[in-house]
Image: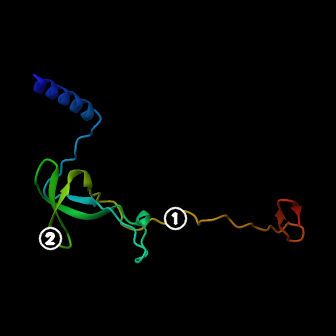
Amino acid sequence: EAKDVAEQQQDKRKHYADKRRREATLFHPGDKVYVTSHPMSSVEKGKTSKFLPRRDGPYVIMSRRSPTTYKIFSLENPTTPLGVYTSALKAFEQGRSNAPILPLRKRGRPRKTVTAGSLSGRLWNQRGRM
């Protein structure tokens, strides 16, 4: 009887845990995917994990090992298969560019501009005229 109660409570907890959980994306052999990388900062190499790419790829799905893992291979090295968990995969987007993103504006405070109508060409400061 204690076993039955434990199983019922476990089923109840699973039901509540699965309520907000999303279904895993199903990939098929031949699909291209990105794999989540876990970059590490390196002072010697001058790398900061904040600015390193979060995903690596594209990789190609070879087969599905289990409901949660896939066997994938790199396009550069197709002879070496890798095993990857489903949550680390993201579908490859064909139209997406791999070019670096450029900032919209420069960093820092904008420079003061002197107009032609200013008195002696001097700038104003917080206390008034200089």
Determine the residue located farthest toward the front in the rendered image.
Answer: 2
- Of residues 41 and 113, the one nearer the viewer is 41
Disc 2, SS: loop
Q: In this figure, which residue is indicated by the disc labeled 1? A: 103
| Helix, strand or loop at mark 1 | loop
- Measured from the top left, where is residue 42 in percent x and y? 40, 72
Residue at image coords 11%, 50%: 66
In-image side of 60 versus 111 (left or right): left
**Which sits in the foreground, 33 or 5?**
5
- Residue 88's quadrant in the figure? bottom left
The amino acid type found where label 2 is placed reads Pro
Amino acid, disc 1: Pro
| Location of residue 72 (image quadrant) | bottom left
Q: Residue at x 36, y 66 (%)?
A: 40
Specify the label residue 52 is tagged with: none
Q: Is residue 3 left or right of residue 44?
A: left
Answer above or below: position of 82 versus 43: above
Q: Is 37 or 41 nearer to us in this picture?
A: 41
Mark 2 / mark 1, whichever is N-terminal:
2
**Cβ atoms at labels 2 and 1 below 8 Å apart:** no
The residue furthest bottom is: 44
Name the quarter where the C terminus is drawn.
bottom right
Estimate how packed mark 2 is, as few (under 14), some (14 to 19) or many (20 or more) residues with alpha carbons within 10 Å. Answer: few
Question: Considering depth in this image, is 92 or 10 the residue closer to the camera?
Answer: 10
Q: Which residue, given by chain and number where applicable, does mark 2 sit on?
A: 78
Instruction: Examine the rendered structure and indicate whether residue 27 appears above or below residue 96.
Output: above
